[in-house]
Image (spheres, rainbow, N blue to C red):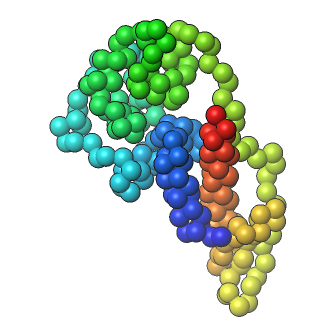
Amino acid sequence: MRIEDLEELLNSRIIAAYSGGMSVVEINRALGRSRVEFVHGLLRDTGYIQPMARSEYRRTYDIDFRFSSVLRKMGYSFGRWCLGWKMDPSSAAVDLKTQPKNGEITAAHEALRRDFPEVHFRIFGGPSPKRRPRAGEFSSPPTVMIAWDMTRDGYVAKIVEHPTVEEIGVDWEHAVERIRTAYGLFERITKLNKAIRLKATE
C-alpha cells in the first residue's frame, strides 16, 4: 500500500470510527494529533458533521474556563465541538452550567465526560477518571528495505515487518522520505483500529 492508498484507508477508518460512536476528540486522540482540524474537517466535508452557520463563527458561550481552555488548545470552539456531538450549543451551554441531578446526566455532560474526563471531574466531581489506555503503541522502529526495481524504474522501499507498506522513489533519499510518510499513515491507521476495537468492548 502506498501513500495514496493509506490516506484513503485512514479517511475511511475515521468515518467508520465516527459512525460507530466515537467522537471527534476521541478519534483525534487515538491518532495522536494535538489539533482537530483534520478530523473535524474530513467529517464535515463528507457530510457527517453539519457545517457551522456563518452567524456562529464569532459567537461565544458562557462555559467554564477550564473547558474552553482545553478546546482552544485543540483548535476547537465550543460551537464546533457541539456540532461534532450533534448538540445545540445554546442548550448544551445551559446544561453545563448545572450539576447533574439524581445521576441523570445530560448529553452535554456525557460528551464532556467522554472527551475530557479530567475537566469534567474538576468541574463536577464524581468518580476519579480512569487512565486512558494507549492505542496501538509501536515498541520498536521499523526495518526498511530499499532496492532498485528495474521494471518499476525506481527505488522501492518496503517495511520488512509490514511488507504491504511500500513506496517508490527516484533515489534513495526520495524513497526514504516517501516510506517514512507511508509508515506514519500506517501507524495512525493501526492506532485508530485499536481504539475502535476498545470502544466496541465498552
* Residue 145 image position (x, y, % from top left): 80, 69
What residue sits 82% from the left and 65% below the top? 160
- Check the image and report above or below for 89 versus 26: above
What residue sits 49% from the left and 53% below the top? 15
Q: Does the image show residue 99?
A: yes
In the rendered view of the protein, which quadrant contains the N terminus? bottom right
Name the residue at the bottom extreme: 151
- Closest to the observer, 140 or 78: 78
Using residue 201 as the reference point, say whether residue 112 is left or right of it: left
Using residue 60 as the reference point, say whether residue 173 is left or right of it: right
In the rendered view of the protein, which quadrant contains the C terminus? top right
Q: Does the image show residue 34?
A: no
- Closest to the observer, 178 or 60: 60
What residue sits 37% from the left and 17% below the top? 96
- Check the image and report above or below for 71 versus 179: above
* Residue 114 image position (x, y, % from top left): 53, 28
